[in-house]
Amino acid sequence: MSVQYIFFYGTLMCPDVYQAVTGRELIAEKASLKNYRIYSLKNRVYPGIVPFRGAEVCGLMTKVDAETIMRLDQFEGGEYERLSVNISDQSDNKLTGWAYVLREDSYHILASAGWSFQNFLENELANYLP
């Protein structure tokens, strides 16, 4: 069973959401993804990222196994595609891993640039978890 890295930037940064989706405890470190921008999405409480030269998305990176990736794929659904990306850890080391990027055919749901994790925690989390 190979262990891989995954970068996430939205609701999965919340330990309760991550555990509800994967059945695992969230053990992660801060990381970033260069040349992507985060956007709020229309009528949704979660964000999406799209390629954008010169931008950077801050988030978390963790190790995952094949079973966890399968659960995350199901959770992310058809609006996203899991792409191989270069993740930068806190020391700016580059690691190859996965990120869920908004599919180009879903760009019509892009709203404003930016998304607030803090706003999600304070105003949306209680209704988001089952």
Image (cartoon, rainbow, N blue to C red):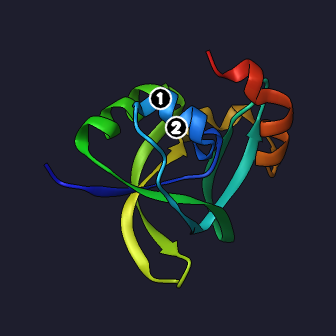
Residue at the location (40% across, 51% down)? Answer: 83
Residue 120 seen in render: yes
C-beta proximity under 8 Å, tags 1 and 2? yes
Is residue 124 shown left or right of residue 51? Answer: right
Q: Which mark is residue 123?
A: none
User: What amino acid is found at the position of numbered circle 2 in the picture?
Assistant: Tyr
Read off the residue under disc 2: 18
Q: Which mark is residue 21?
A: 1
Circle 2 sits in a helix, a strand or a loop, which is it?
A: helix
User: What amino acid is found at the position of numbered circle 1 in the picture?
Assistant: Val
Residue at the location (54% across, 31% down)? Answer: 79
Foreground of the two, 70 or 24: 24
Point out the residue furthest to the top here. Answer: 130
On-image quarter of the C terminus:
top right
The x, y position of residue 94, in whole percent, is 43, 78
Q: Is residue 109 above or below residue 69?
A: above
Residue at the location (79% across, 37% down)? Answer: 120
Q: Is residue 104 above or below residue 84?
A: above
The x, y position of residue 9, in whole percent, is 61, 51
Is residue 52 shown left or right of residue 122? Answer: left
Q: Is residue 86 above or below residue 72?
A: below
Residue at the location (66% across, 68% down)? Answer: 56
- Tell me how far mark 1 sits from mark 2, CA to CA: 5 Å
Circle 1 sits in a helix, a strand or a loop, which is it?
A: helix
